[in-house]
Image (cartoon, helix red, strand yellow):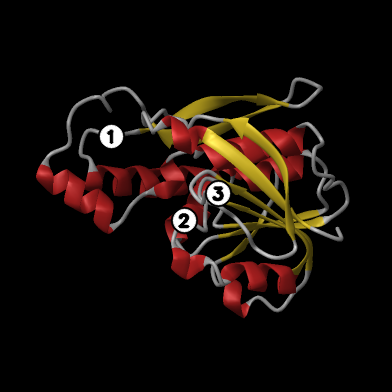
C-alpha cells in the first residue's frame, strides 16, 4: 500500500470510528469477476460485530453523516458485474461514475478497458475511499466533486441508486447533457418512466456487507438511454 493509500485508510477508519467506535475497515473480495477470472476487492466496513444493535447516539451519528462509501450497494455491485462481463461496452471510452461511493462501478469500467474513468461524488471521503480502492485494484481514476460544474463530455455515464429521492430526478436531464449514453441501475424506484430510457436488464444482488435489506430492494433494474 502506498503512502497516500495508507493516509486515506487511516482517515477513513478514523471517520468510521467516530460513528461506530468498534468498527473497522476490511479488505473484502467481491463475488464478481470477468471471463478471465479477474475480480474486485474493496475496503469496506468489517461485517464482524455488525450484528450488535446500535445505540441511540450511534444511530443519530450514522443518519447525520452516512458513510455510503463503506458499503458496496447491490445496484453498484450488479452494474460492476455487467461491466466486467461486457454487457455495456466501455473499451476505449471516457466514463463517468456518478455518486461513485466505493467506486466499484468506476473500477469495473477501468478493468473493462475504459480509456478514462471519472469517479464523481459530493462526499470528499467517498473520493478518498475511491482512490484507496482504485489503488487496491491497480487502476487509475480521475476524481470529480462537483458534477454541476463539470464542463466536459463523456461517452457513457453510469448512475447506481441515486434517484430514490424525487428531488434527484432532474439529474437525469443533466446526465443526458453530459453523456452520449446513460445507464441507470436502480433498486428503489419502482416505475422509472423517464422519457428516452428503456429497461435493459434485471438481476438480484445483495449489498456487501449484507445489511439484511428487504427482498424488494435486492431486485436491480437497468435502464439505458435510447439511441446509444
Mark on residue 23?
A: 1
At x 69%, y 50%, the residue is 223
Circles 2 and 3: CB atoms closer than 8 Å: no
* Numbered label attached to residue 164: 2
Q: Give the CA distance from mark 2 to mark 3.
A: 22 Å
One can see residue 122 in this view: yes
Q: Quadrant of the C terminus?
A: bottom right
* Most foreground residue, 200 or 105: 200
Disc 2 vs disc 1: which is toward the camera? Answer: 2
List x then y, in percent, for residue 60: 18, 52
In-front residue for pair 150/133:
150
Residue on which disc 3 sits: 130
Mark 2 or 3 closer to N-term?
A: 3
Number of residues whose C-alpha sits closer than 10 Å to that of mark 1, classed few (under 14), some (14–19) or many (20 or more): some
Q: Which residue is drawn at the image coordinates 82% and 36% (left, top)?
A: 86
Q: Is residue 49 above or below residue 134?
A: above
Residue in front for this viewpoint, 157 or 26? 157
Residue at the left extreme of this rendering? 56
Rendering quarter of residue 38: top right
| Position of 10 relative to 120 (above/below) | above
What SS does tag 3 mark?
Answer: helix
Circle 2 crowding by C-alpha within 10 Å: few under 14, some 14–19, many from 20? few
Q: Quadrant of the N terminus?
A: top right
Q: What is the distance, in whole Å, between disc 2 and disc 1 at their CAs?
A: 27 Å
Query: In screen coordinates, is 146 left or right of 49?
Result: right
**Does residue 137 show up?**
no
Amino acid at each position: 500500500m502506498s503512502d497516500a493509500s495508507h493516509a486515506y485508510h487511516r482517515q477513513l477508519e478514523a471517520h468510521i470510528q467516530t460513528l461506530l467506535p468498534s468498527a473497522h475497515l476490511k479488505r473484502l473480495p467481491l463475488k464478481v469477476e470477468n471471463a478471465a477470472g479477474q475480480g474486485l476487492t474493496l475496503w469496506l466496513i468489517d461485517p464482524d460485530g455488525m450484528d450488535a444493535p446500535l445505540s441511540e447516539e450511534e444511530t443519530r451519528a450514522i443518519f447525520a453523516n452516512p458513510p455510503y462509501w463503506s458499503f458496496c450497494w447491490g445496484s453498484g455491485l450488479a452494474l460492476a458485474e455487467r461491466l466486467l462481463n461486457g454487457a455495456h461496452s466501455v473499451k476505449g471510452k471516457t466514463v463517468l461514475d456518478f455518486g461513485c461511493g466505493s467506486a466499484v462501478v468506476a473500477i469495473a469500467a477501468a478493468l473493462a478497458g475504459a480509456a478514462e474513468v471519472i469517479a464523481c461524488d459530493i462526499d470528499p471521503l467517498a473520493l478518498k475511499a475511491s482512490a484507496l480502492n482504485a489503488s487496491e485494484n491497480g487502476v487509475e481514476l480521475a476524481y470529480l466533486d462537483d458534477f454541476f460544474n463539470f464542463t466536459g463530455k463523456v461517452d457513457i455515464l453510469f448512475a447506481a441508486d441515486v434517484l430514490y429521492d424525487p428531488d434527484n430526478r432532474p439529474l437525469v436531464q443533466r446526465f443526458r447533457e453530459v453523456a452520449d449514453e446513460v445507464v441507470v441501475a436502480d433498486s428503489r424506484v419502482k416505475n422509472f418512466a423517464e422519457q428516452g430510457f428503456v429497461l435493459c436488464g434485471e438481476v438480484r444482488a445483495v449489498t456487501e456487507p449484507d445489511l439484511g435489506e428487504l427482498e424488494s430492494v435486492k431486485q436491480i433494474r437497468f435502464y439505458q438511454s435510447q439511441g446509444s
